[in-house]
Image (cartoon, rainbow, N blue to C red):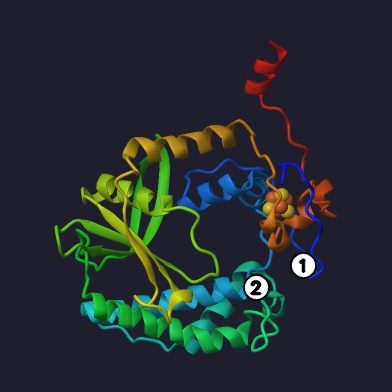
Amino acid sequence: MTALEIVPVDSSAPAKTDLPGPKQFRLPGHLSFSALSTYAECGERYRIERGHGVRGPSYWNTVGGTAVHHVTELADRAWFGEDVEVLDFEAAFEEAIAEEVERSGFPESALRASGRASKAWPDKQNKSWWLTHGPLYVSAWIRWRENTGYRLWETPWGEPGIEVPIEVHVGGEPFVGYIDRVFVDPNDGTGVPVDLKCGNHEPKSSLQLGTYGVGLARDYGLPVRRGGFWMAKNYEKDGDGLKYMEDLSRFTPEYVDVQFAMAWRGIRAGVFLPSPGMMCKSCSVRDFCTLMGGERADELPALEVSSDMKQITSG
Ligand code: SF4
């Protein structure tokens, strides 16, 4: 498929919703890995979502994933010795739904189901699907922790390595991130960042883990050699969801810095190329995407060639 080939609109695409209108474009104060990833996947989506602040209704998978993160966090904190009450999945799920409704302004009925329809689940991964699978995901995480025996790293202020904040410069600009877990490698004492993924797709690369490795070294002086993604969808497979624990040595500070520096240059220069593809089917801001015939695309201010580009093109 060429870069500018139009992808036909899928008849199963979500119904058009009354998204709030775009705000004035704002440059970011920092980048997170998720922002870099959105920008790399589709510049136009980044511009609409993050630049103009247009956010569509979320997905059941996102809300279910939030609940899994919450319950596993509480379980890990209790394991670490903190005096916390561990919610069951259903309670955490209802909390996450209420928070999403409050945050987005859309009703619960606007939440979208994703994944494949099957005989057992003809309505895809909806609320019922999550009420069945969420508790299984949580159990798999607890099994994985028991089986590996990995110890959580302890932050300099004595907290367990859960949602570890990273605030450093990457590519010479502010970077902010929260690492789901940081464990201690029993072999050599290095830090092991682990990210919990609750969606259907495998990460396309391990750059997220490599970025966290650089962030941990910069922010805390903690060397990192390996890291891993814990895939909730693999809950029945060997390893209870941990897809791999990978050598991250190829993600040198120089390499990671360059990736973020390139993104900053592109964003500042107004480079927001659309990238049509499979993601368009579920893109929550498609209504605003000119390339895909979005009905509200004319509400976005036209992209201007930046002054840098004018100098180059007029010379
Ligand atoms: S519809 Fe496709 S091309 Fe348009 S913003 Fe969304 S992902 Fe990008």
Q: Which residue is mark 2?
A: 114
Query: Pointer 2: residues within 10 angstroms few (<14), some, or many (20+)?
Result: some
Element under disc 2: loop
View extreme (top): residue = 315
The picture places residue 219, in percent across and down from the top left corner, at 27, 48
Q: Amino acid at mark 2?
A: Ser
Q: Amino acid at mark 1?
A: Ala
The picture places residue 114, in percent across and down from the top left corner, at 65, 73
**Residue drawn at x 63%, y 69% as measured from the top left:** 58
**Residue drawn at x 77%, y 67% as measured from the top left:** 13
Element under disc 1: loop
239 relative to 67 in the view: left or right: left
Q: Is residue 61 above or below residue 163?
A: below
Q: Which residue is mark 1?
A: 13
Q: Locate the C terminus by quadrant.
A: top right
Residue 22 visible, this angle: no
Badge 2 or badge 1: first in the primary sequence: 1
Label 1 residue near ligand 1, CB within 8 Å? no
Q: Is residue 211 above or below residue 271?
A: below
299 relative to 181 in the view: left or right: right
Picture quadrant of residue 170: top left
**Residue drawn at x 53%, y 77% as measured from the top left:** 64
Q: Nearer the viewer, residue 175 or 243?
A: 243
The picture places residue 305, in percent across and down from the top left corner, at 71, 28
**Residue drawn at x 76%, y 50% as measured from the top left:** 289
Residue 300's disc is none
Q: Is residue 184 above or below residue 89?
A: above
